[in-house]
Image: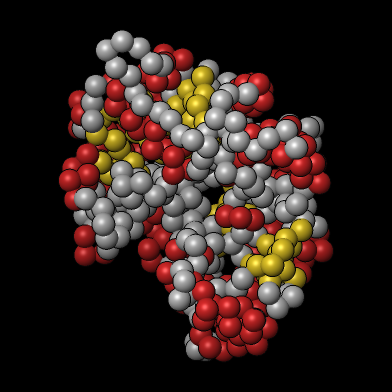
Amino acid sequence: MPTSAAYEKEYVSRTRRSRAHFEKARKLLPAGVESNVRFFEPYPFYVKRAKGPYIYDLDGNRIIDFALGYGPMILGHDNPEVVKAVKAQVGKGTMYGASSEMAAEYVRTIQKAMPSIEMFRFANSGTEATMHPMRVARAYTGREKIAKAEGSYHGGHDYALQGVDIPEDMLRDVRHQPSVPFGKGVPKCISDLMVMYPFNDWGATEDVLTRNADDLAAVIIEPVQAGGGCFAPRDNYLKRLRKLTKDLGIVLIFDEVLTGFRVARGGAQERYDVKPDITCVAKVAGGGYQLGGFGGSRKIMEEIVPKAGGNVYHGGTYNAHPVSVAAGLKTLQILGRPGVYRKIDRIGDSLFRGLKDVAEDRGVDVWVESVGSLGQMYFTDKEVSKWRDAMDIDREKWNHWFMHSLGRGVFFGVPHPDEHFFTSIVHSEKDIQHSLDVSDEAFKMIAKE
C-alpha cells in the first residue's frame, strides 16, 4: 500500500494557505479547530465561503461538499429562500427573551411531518435535544437507567458519551457489555446508569432490555444508527423494539437528529412506520442555524409543565431563537413541497450505488450502506450491518480514498471512517459523476497495490 503521503500530496500542494492558517490557529484553538471531529491529518482545510453544493477554501479551491455542515444543509449552502427569511427576521429583532407566534407555527409544521409529536420544546443543538428527554423519561417512569446502542452517538453530554467507542480489550459479549466512557473527564459513576444493547441484533437486544426492565426509564436509539457510520435497521428491528418497550413500560426515544427531515419528511419513523414516545431533532430542523428540540406524547411532555410539587426543569436562553426558527421553518416548508424527497433519494442513490459499482469495477472490496441521502462506504469484503462489523474494516484504505478525493476537490463528509456523508437536493448529475470519477482514480491506485 502506498504511504499516506502519496495520497496527501495533491491535498498539501493545493492547501498552502490552510496549512499556514492551521499553524496559527492551533496556538489559539486546541488542534486548531472548533470541534474535534473537524480535525484530521495532516491538517484540516479552512473555509472562506459556501454556495449550493460547494465550499471554497482559503486557497480558492472549489470543493464538492458531501459533509454539508455534518448534516444540516440538505438544501445546500446559502439557499436564497432561507436567506430571505433570515434577513426578514433580523429586521424584526434577533433576540426577545420572550415567546413568539412563529415558534408555534414551527411546531405545527413539525407535527404535520411527525404526528407522534403532540407537544414540543425547543433546544439549541442535538446534544441538548437528547439530554432533556432522558431527564423527562426518568421523571415520567420513576426509574434512573437509560439503554443505548453500543457505538451510537447521541451528543456530547456525559450520559450520551457512554459506549461510543469501546476499546477492543474492553469488548464483552453483546448481551453483557458494560458501559464504557468515551474519552477522559466523564465520571465513571454515570456508566452505572447506562445499559448497552447491540443495534440490529434482536435476540441480544430483547435479552438485555428484558433483564434490565425494572430499572430502565428509556431506550434511546438512532433509528438508522449513524454512530459508527450508517447502519439501516433490518428484520423489523424497530417495530420489535417498539412493541417490547411498550410491553415493558419503557419510554422509547428516537434520536432523529440526523435522520429527521433527511431520510423522509417525517424522518425514520415515517420511513419505517414506527411511532416513538419522544423524538429528538436538530441538524436539518434548523436549516443551518442553531436549533434543536424534542417532542412526544402529551402525557410525557407535560412532566415539564411547572406545577406544585415540582416538575422537570427545561430552559435555555436561546431556545427558539427567532432567526433560527425562521431558517428552520422555511427549510421545513421547502421540504414539504411535492416531489422533494423523490429527488433527494434519487441523488443519494446515484452517489452511493455509483461508489459501489466503481469500486467493484476496480476489484476493490467495499460495503456501501445508505438510506436515502445518508450513507457510508466501508473497505471490507463482508456485510456491515452492525457496529461491531465496522470494527474490522480497512481504515488505511478509507483514509487513502478520502485524502485522494479531497485533493481532487471532493469532500466526502466527516473526515473519519466511522462517520458518514450526505447528498443534498442541489448536487447535480455533473457533481455526482465527477465525484465518482475521482473515486475511481483512488480505487485504481488502491487496487494496484
Q: How many marks?
A: 0
Q: Which residue is pictured at 65% across the width and 38% down the height?
A: 94
- Closest to the observer, 373 or 416: 416
Q: Quadrant of residue 283?
A: top right
Residue 403, given in percent of the width and then of the height, sits at 58, 77
When the figure is inspected, residue 3 is found, relative to residue 101, above or below; the finding is below
When the figure is inspected, residue 100 is found, relative to residue 299, above or below; the finding is below
In what quadrant of the picture does the C terminus appear? bottom right
The answer to whether residue 392 of the structure is visible from this angle is yes
Q: How is the protein colored in the picture?
A: secondary structure
- Closest to the observer, 231 or 265: 265
Q: Residue furthest top?
A: 308
Q: Which residue is pictured at 52% across the width and 79% down the height?
A: 24
Residue 10, given in percent of the width and then of the height, sits at 65, 85
Q: Quadrant of residue 277?
A: top left
Q: Which residue is pictured at 44% across the width and 44% down the height?
A: 127
Residue 401, given in percent of the width and then of the height, sits at 58, 75
Judge left or right: residue 32 versus residue 333: left
When the figure is inspected, residue 64 is found, relative to residue 214, above or below; the finding is below
Judge left or right: residue 202 versus residue 447: left
When the figure is inspected, residue 260 is found, relative to residue 29, above or below; the finding is above
Q: Which residue is pictured at 57% across the width and 89% down the height?
A: 6
The answer to whether residue 361 of the structure is visible from this angle is no
